[in-house]
Image (tube, helix red, strand yellow):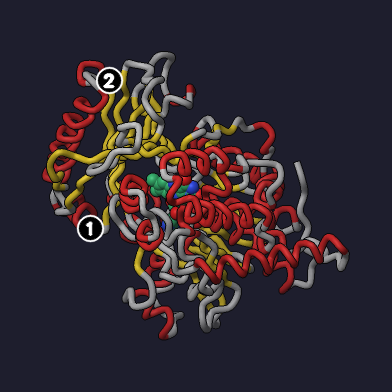
Amino acid sequence: MKVNIIGAGISGLTAGCYLQMNGYQTEIFEKHAIPGGLCTSWKKGEYTIDGCVHWILGSDKGSSFYKMWSELLDMSAIPFKNHTERLELEVENTRDKYGSNIFHLYTDLNRLQEYLIDLAPEDSAAIKSFIHPMRIMQKFDLPPVMDDLPLIPSLIQGMKMSRYLEFLYWFLKLKKQTNFTFAATLKNPFLKESFQLLYDGEEVNMMILTMPLSSFDKKSAGYPIGGSLSFAKRIEQAYLKLGGQVHYNTPVKKVIVENEAATGLLVRNNVVHASDLTISAADWYYTVFEALDGKFVDQEILDLRDLKKLDVFYSVMQFSFGINADLKEIPHFSRFPLSEDLVSPDGTVYKRLEVHVYNYDPTLAPKGKTVVTVSFYTTKREYWIDLRKHDRLAYRLAKSTFAEKILTLLDKRLGGIRDRIEMTDVATPATFQRYTNNWKGSTQGWLPGKNLLAASPVTHELPGLKNFYNSSHWNQPGGGLPIAISTGRSIAKLICKRDKKRFKTRDF
Ligand SMILES: Cc1cc2nc3c(=O)[nH]c(=O)nc-3n(C[C@H](O)[C@H](O)[C@H](O)COP(=O)(O)OP(=O)(O)OC[C@H]3O[C@@H](n4cnc5c(N)ncnc54)[C@H](O)[C@@H]3O)c2cc1C
């Protein structure tokens, strides 16, 4: 049985690997010259700029995501960096009892609890109620991704069930809690301000904070040394070893449909590649409204297109600088306030700067040198995409003028780096859209709604179309690598089920 896959991003490669393991003959058609999609890095001079991963869920042996990654690649061969601090946050109006305006978000939960209680003993009860649910979450390993494991009706299973009930209790209790509502329960002014500013003054569901923190503490959300492209290439190599074939520089124009079934792909030079099944692991909007001309839709899909159900995840502007200094003493991830508002060419006003210092990955820069990246999330992605399309000169000017402003701010912050800058690189929503086709330059598909665990309105199949599946981070709001891989696996499993085959995997 022949399966065509559009896109060699993480989801497409994953679906390809599992289908190859199960005896299908697959071919991937990728518009870019390299694998990985959004999970990417690029070289500029002697520096490597990472465009994606800060942490990967499942980097420790204990988690089911580790087991799943290990079906694809040799996880034990990847050195993961587990940071002791998630973030250093500078607050504006208050100081802690030692006179510092820096809030440390430690990744070790015991250390974090001790630190918070030391600063605010008057808030002990609230602090414990923040830490405790994360301990419960840690006991609850996410089972749905490994749902083909045999269910053993044993004592162990019973214990897992009781853990689940405990998790459910805390989940229901805290599902509406945000960093603002939590901050409102705190008496200590420094902690109150710190929690309010954790997401640049935005109100965010606390689970966005607590879920990763519970994984950081378990050392289950590490950064893969070597960066994103190196990680993606490991999966590409596994796919090729399993007998798969990737056609790079081959953009797919259309999915060919005959008798309401997908029968092949039309690629460049009007070449047709026939198949029994087709998986699109490319962007959702492109797939439904361009490759299939919007012919296989229902009201639910039209509502998604018109952004009535969900919004598209933020895009990002990323300014990277190669600096001739090791910057070992600078925190790897920090946010700090600006003395005056910074207005982006797209009109967004930023009051704070978010800085990543890659001083922990020696593979990204020569010895003694470091890449520093400043990132800005934006919803004004059309500004960049349209500007690049209609006025390339103005686009370049907007990038370089804004980069210069950022460099001035960074120079002030990091203390005289201007003379040591050897490389500048700017990526905008237009860059992410151009290289990966993601609608509006989205970095993670759909933005999750208020209910984080709501069932996804995005379906694996399209109404009225046979022999066709969608598989990407667009399948579950929130996106990210865990969704990309688990969806690729689920689609492969669904296809095996449809063909009445037992789903087989393998382990490294
Ligand atoms: C700056 C940034 C930071 C991030 N940080 C993290 C993080 O720390 N942790 C995390 O888990 N996730 C992170 N993510 C999100 C994560 O990278 C994505 O959710 C994930 O990589 C999506 O994978 P995918 O395979 O579903 O889609 P994509 O990566 O979009 O892959 C789709 C592929 O299809 C190809 N394609 C599209 N159209 C066509 C066509 N017509 N013909 C042929 N090929 C086509 C594209 O070129 C691409 O290779 C980050 C993303 C960004 C941009």
Say what amino acid the circle numbered 1 marks. Lys
Q: Residue furthest front?
A: 122
- Helix, strand or loop at mark 2: strand
Q: Nearer the viewer, residue 498 or 193?
A: 193
- Helix, strand or loop at mark 1: loop
- Horizontally, residue 365 falls left or right of residue 8, namely left
Residue identifier under label 2: 422
| Of the image marks 1 and 2, the number of the one nearer the N terminus | 1
Say what amino acid the circle numbered 2 marks. Glu
Q: Is residue 415 above or below residue 178?
A: above
Residue at 62% over, 52% down: 135
Residue at 71% over, 59% down: 146
Where residue 269 appears, as percent x and y from the top left, is 41, 55
Whether residue 501 is visible, yes or no, is: yes
- Horizontally, residue 473 falls left or right of residue 374, namely right
Quadrant for the N terminus, please. bottom right
Q: CA distance from mark 1 to mark 2?
A: 30 Å
Where residue 28 appears, as percent x and y from the top left, is 56, 53
Q: Residues within 10 Å of mark 1 (few under 14, many from 20)?
A: some
* Residue 364 location, quadrant: top left
Residue identifier under label 1: 380
